[in-house]
Structure formats: structure tokens, C-alpha cells
Image (spheres, grey):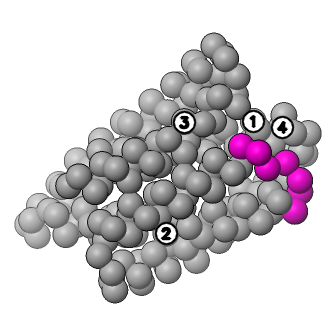
């Protein structure tokens, strides 16, 4: 379930961030720059997340990283300046992407060795199923109210992921 909510937050961010940037008047080149920086710094975040997940308790790390990522996604709702957006995508790319290796390590730890492949396949299937619901839900809310209101779901999904992982 945690993987699902983290995936919902990620999918919502990747789909609705370009729409937000378009509403703010950014060019397609700026979209590309922001998403490339987010993903590029995400590579570093994944390495750091994997490293720290070997040193610290994974459940707590996923919860903390989900909350911090949710806070950064909430701040994004009010960001508009070019430099502010650059700073956001760099820091968010580092933090948000560090969740993935930590979460995958945790899922592997919780799956019997002889079932790692099957277990991860089931976990990912559930995560992708939930992630596929995120754009539809956000689109419906955008149509009913506004994109700004629907974008609030992204940090909400991240916070729910933190609560779920802590409940074990």
C-alpha cells in the first residue's frame, strides 16, 4: 500500500507539474530543464537513499522521506519564480527519489528469499495499479474545481504513504 501511495504521488507530480508550469507561462524548454534536473538529481538521490537505507531503519526512512517530499510538493503549489523552481526540482529530485531504493529494500526484506521475484512483482503490480488511478482522480478534481486543488493530492498521497508504512 505504501508503494502505491508513493507511486500515486510520483505519477501525479510527473503528469501535473508540466500543466502547472504551463499555467505559469513557462516554455517547453523550461519543462524539459525542470524535469531533467528533477530526474538527474534523482539519480544522486537514489544512490544516497540506497546508501542510507543500508545504515538506518528502512521503515522510518521511508516515512521521513515521504513527509519531507510531501512538504516540498506542497511548497511547489506556491512556487512560481524561475530560480525558486530550479531550487525546488533539485532538492525534490534528491529527496523524493531517495525513497525508491529504500522502499524496494524494505519490500525485499519483507519477502521470503525464495519469493523475491514474485513478491516484488506483486508489490509493483499493486503500486502501478494505484499510480494509474492518480492522474484520473486528479483530472476529475481539476475538472470539478481547479488544478491547484487537485495538486494538493500529491503531498496528501505522500503523507498517507508515511502513515501506512509506520503502521506496519
Instruction: Locate residue 95, reporting x and y percent.
Output: 56, 67
Q: Check disc 3 and report the residue beneath it.
A: 153
Question: What percent of the width, then of the height, locates residue 132?
Answer: 45, 34
Judge whether residue 33 can be spotted in this image. no
Label 2, label 1: how far apart the Cα atoms are: 25 Å
Task: Determine the secondary structure under disc 1.
Answer: helix
Above or below residue 4? Residue 153 is above
Considering only order in the chain, which callout, 3 or 1, is on the residue closer to the N terminus? 1
Q: Marks 1 and 3, Cα distance to the nearest angstrom? A: 15 Å
Mark number, residue 19: 1
Span colored in magenta = 77-83
Say whether marks 4 and 2 touch (CB < 8 Å): no
Numbered badge on residue 22: 4
Tag in front: 3 or 4: 3
- Residue 98, which numbered label? 2
* Position of 81 relative to 15 (above/below): below
Q: Residues within 10 Å of mark 4 (few under 14, many from 20)?
A: some
**Camera-side residue: 33 or 77?**
77
Q: Residues within 10 Å of mark 2 (few under 14, many from 20)?
A: many
Residue found 29% across the figure and 76% down from its top: 57
Asked whether residue 73 appears in the rendered view, the answer is: yes
**What secondary structure is marked by label 3?**
helix
Would you call the spot at circle 3 few (<14 residues within 10 Å), some (14-19), or many (20 or more)? many
Q: Nearer the viewer, mark 3 or mark 2?
A: 3
The local crowd at label 1, few if under 14, some if 14 to 19, many if 20 or more residues have their Cα within 10 Å, is some
In percent of width and height, residue 51 lies at 42, 84
Are the residues tagged 1 and 4 within 8 Å (C-beta)? yes
Amino acid at each position: 500500500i505504501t508503494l502505491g501511495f508513493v507511486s500515486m504521488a510520483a505519477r501525479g507530480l510527473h503528469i501535473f507539474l508540466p500543466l502547472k508550469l504551463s499555467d505559469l507561462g513557462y516554455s517547453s524548454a523550461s519543462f524539459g530543464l525542470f524535469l531533467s534536473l528533477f530526474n538527474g538529481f534523482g539519480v544522486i538521490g537514489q544512490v544516497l537513499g540506497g546508501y542510507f537505507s543500508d545504515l538506518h531503519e528502512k521503515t522510518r526512512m521511508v516515512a521521513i522521506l515521504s513527509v519531507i517530499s510531501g512538504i516540498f510538493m506542497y511548497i511547489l503549489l506556491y512556487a512560481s519564480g524561475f530560480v525558486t523552481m530550479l531550487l525546488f526540482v533539485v532538492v525534490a529530485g534528491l529527496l523524493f527519489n531517495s525513497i525508491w531504493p529504500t522502499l524496494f529494500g524494505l519490500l525485499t526484506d519483507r519477502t521470503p528469499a525464495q519469493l523475491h521475484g514474485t513478491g516484488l512483482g506483486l508489490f509493483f503490480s499493486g503500486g502501478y495499479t494505484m499510480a494509474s488511478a492518480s492522474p484520473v482522480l486528479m483530472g476529475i478534481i481539476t475538472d470539478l474545481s481547479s488544478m491547484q486543488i487537485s495538486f494538493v493530492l500529491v503531498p496528501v498521497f505522500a503523507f498517507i504513504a508515511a502513515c501506512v508504512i509506520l503502521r506496519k
